[in-house]
Amino acid sequence: MSSTVGNQFRVTTFGESHGPAMGVVIDGVPAGLMLSPEDISFELQFRKTGNYLVSGRRETDEPEIISGLYNGKTTGAPIAIIFRNVDAISSLYSQVSHKPRPGHSDLPLIKKYGRENWDYRGSGRSSARETVSRVAAGAVAKKLLMYTSTYVSGYLKSIGPLEGSHCTDPLLSLNSKKFQTRALDRETDKKYTDLIKTTMKEGDSYGGVAEVFAIKPPEGLGEPVFHKIKAELGMALLSIPAVTGFEYGMGFKASRMKGSEAADEIIKSDEGELELRKNMAGGMLGGFTTGDDICIRCAFKPTSSIRIPARTVDLDTLEPAEISVTGRHDPVVAVRGVSVAEAMMAVVLADYSRIAGIIPHARLSESESDLIEERWKEYTGKCQ
Ligand SMILES: Cc1cc2nc3c(=O)[nH]c(=O)nc-3n(C[C@H](O)[C@H](O)[C@H](O)COP(=O)(O)O)c2cc1C
């Protein structure tokens, strides 16, 4: 059961939803990076539970950094962060223990590992509680990417049939951090909020699409054949629970276009650089980053745990049964999913920047570390 992603910036997550703690180990962070629990908490605020639009489970998500730091800076050793689970209520899952939920991981886990080894409490490792570890790793990756002045930021493009405002400039996606729904603007936030409330009342759920950008990424990350940067991002994004689709740039629309429309025309800039005029490729071409902003989209399916009854089978009697899932669930997982998608993009880009030798392997100098800190403050300031 592998829980590790990455090559030179390696992320391993651990912990179960109703176990004592969740955690993450991050290998490959150079020494000298200033890092504090507040840096991690900054990113975690965007996947928080407990408000009326998302799961009602109230976790404090307080990061305890238990390895890899000395005097507030990384040492080059693995960084380990844990989050104690403080609000697990296992009794809410008594029904799930014998009635696998349609659309969730229950049945496939039982078939692969055996019912006797299945931790059904809060969905065990398959719980989106695991994504707290991803977002923590994403915070470290995002901070490291300040070395190249790269920002990773996204927003919620749509919920179910409702299309939000179109993002004309990737930097505008930072505005979405002001809204609980991760909408781009106030008007869309209101529409999303109304739709989520109605869906909750009906005991149902909706899917959604997150659009995520890497703004000013380094050029040339990735490989030309198997480890294309698009393939690495695809793998990382599709590993997020409930993600059913991934596209970048023109995406599926490209299949309906003519070559003349899709052509990424090459021009010489005023500075004499060769550039792609329209960035139709979404920042990735031939397996590499082009240096243009990366644009990806991922589709989240509707939450499978819903109050509306659905057919299943009782595992104790093997008779047909019905399940209506109550308890604390996100009506639209894509809302909190935006921050998870950002985290996975940042992890991949930090990894490939380390592989390319763009981010130093062993240590950051004091001036590099100060510069990163300055840029991080600028970034967090722009998200307020
Ligand atoms: C941020 C986030 C929150 C989620 N919350 C829930 C939830 O409250 N209830 C639920 O049934 N599924 C939730 N999911 C989805 C399940 O974790 C996911 O569907 C399940 O693990 C099966 O994986 P798969 O859909 O990728 O096959 C959430 C996913 C994400 C990314």
Image (cartoon, grey):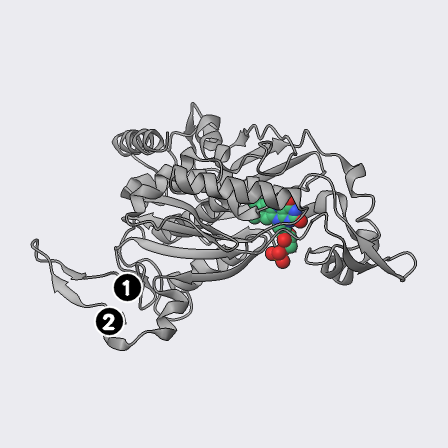
Would residue 78 be seen by someone viewing this image from the given angle? no
10 Å crowding of disc 2: few (<14), some (14-19), many (20+): some
Q: Position of residue 42 (x, y in %)?
A: 45, 31
Rendered view: 39 above or below 103 = above
Q: Which mark is residue 259?
A: none
Residue 75 can be seen in this image = yes
Residue corresponding to mark 2: 263
| Residue 228 placement (x, y as % from top left) | 38, 65
In which quadrant of the rendered image does the C terminus lie?
top left
Question: Is 362 placed above or below 112 here?
Answer: above
Residue drawn at 52 percent across, 38 percent down: 47
Q: Amino acid at mark 1?
A: Met
Secondary structure, mark 1, is loop
Q: Circle 2 sits in a helix, a strand or a loop, which is it? A: loop
Task: Indicate which disc residue 280 carries.
Answer: 1
Do the numbered discs 1 and 2 sit on residues whose CB atoms are within 8 Å?
A: yes
Count of numbered circles in the view: 2
Q: State left or right for residue 258 relative to residue 86.
A: left
Residue 2 spot, x, y in % from top left: 61, 55
Residue 364 drawn above or below residue 345: above
Q: Residue at x 27, y 34 (%)?
A: 368
> For this rendering, which residue is in front, 239 or 338?
338
For the N terminus, the image quarter is: bottom right
Q: Residue at x 77, y 49 (%)?
A: 324
The three-letter code of the residue at mark 2 reads Ala
Task: Compute the Cα span from label 1 to label 2.
Answer: 7 Å
Q: Earlier in the sequence, mark 1 or mark 2?
A: 2
Q: Quadrant of residue 244?
A: bottom right
